[in-house]
Amino acid sequence: MITTLYKLKNGIRAFRRWMIPAVNAKLHPKEFRPVLSYLFTEWKCNIDCHYCFQFDNKQNGMTLETAKKSIDWLKSKGCRVLALMGGEVLLRPGFILDVINYGVKQGFFVYLPTNGYLLTKDFIDKAGRAGVAAINLAVDCVTLKPGLPKALMSIEKQFRYLVKKQEEYGYVLFFNINITSKNLKDVKMLTEIARANGIGTDYHVNEPPQTDQPHYQHNREEALYIKEEQFEEFDELMDWLIDKNKQGYPMVNHPYHFEHMKKFVRGEYEPWKCVAGKNGCFIKMDGSLSPCFGLQSSDMDWGKIGNSNFDQEKLDEIKKECNKHCLSTCFYTSGKYYGSFPDMYRWIMKHTKLGRNI
């Protein structure tokens, strides 16, 4: 009975926080109507993934005042899904709990990403009671590998407690997996572990940065991109994920995203519908805006909270180039599932597949 209610509540929440804003966005196609927006609260991180270009331990984080103003502005634009982002957001647990509390009170589906190392039972309980809607647990491998510190066995106690409490507190839980040259076999194992525990999965293919990142600490050769001699193994993994997707495994990704990844790792460009700057945006620590995660370090002026400047013609031109180097799971998925009402329905139903099998 508890599991049935959990699945039902997930579906209702997804309908209210995802589908209604998405429908409103379709009814106002010329307006900036974000369905999902990222709040980048922290550059700093407690671990060092060799593929990551988005952490810098010399920078301070977002203030609570900026976070609240951002949430208020997003609410005025019709947005109801708030994804926190870092760095590692749990470096300031008190701050992030304040943001979760405020976001939930303003009617948002608040999504919390973490590598899990800093999770405690006390924090999980407080975030759960506050009403956090989703917890994205970033894991790339089962056991530690060189350059890949996000190993499930390193955070097993935290993982077990998250699974134990998901139905009590009502949040959805999923693995966020970055596919690199060193974890192709682990991806399958993590997928099956997720399935066995009634949680979802979210896959990314390792990508180069869109802009120069002078704070990156490693040689580009260490960035763990898929190598030519791995293409066949990579294709087999993509086919396996497509098959599991069709079997009903709860995955964020649209099935064609995996097909597209095969071409992407080979450097073959295929245009895709990116809705960054239209149905989603990225709020930087000072309250200035970017269409997406990848362009946050560019020198282009996209406005700030309260005064966005997302020129769609300009964005369309930029995307012709940046899409060659990016396959964003967030905006690829958004482009696929916001395309039609049947697709929106499929997205909502994904939320009802989470939790234990009845």
Image (tube, rainbow, N blue to C red):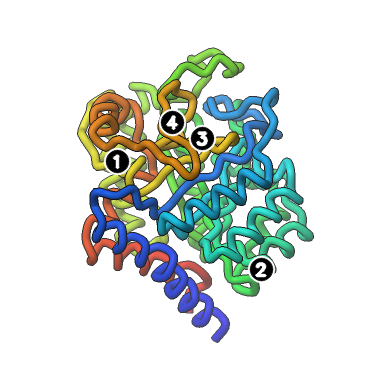
The one of 181 and 3 positioned closer to us in this rendering: 3
Residue plotted at (51% across, 35% down) = 288
In this orientation, which residue lies closer to the viewer: 30 or 165?
A: 30
| Circle 4 crowding by C-alpha within 10 Å: few under 14, some 14–19, many from 20 | many
Q: Which mark is residue 294?
A: 4
- The residue sitting at 67% across, 32% down in the picture is 44
Mark toward the viewer: 2 or 1: 1
Residue 12 at x, y percent in the picture: 44, 75
Specify the amino acid type for callout 1: Cys
Rendering coords of residue 67 (x, y %): 61, 47
Which label lies toward us, 3 or 1?
Answer: 3
Residue 193 visible at all: no
Say if 282 sits above or below 217 in the image.
Answer: below
**Cα–Cα gap, marks 3 and 1:** 21 Å
Kindly identify the residue that appears in the image at 65 percent across and 39 percent down.
62
**C-alpha distance separating marks 2 and 1:** 35 Å
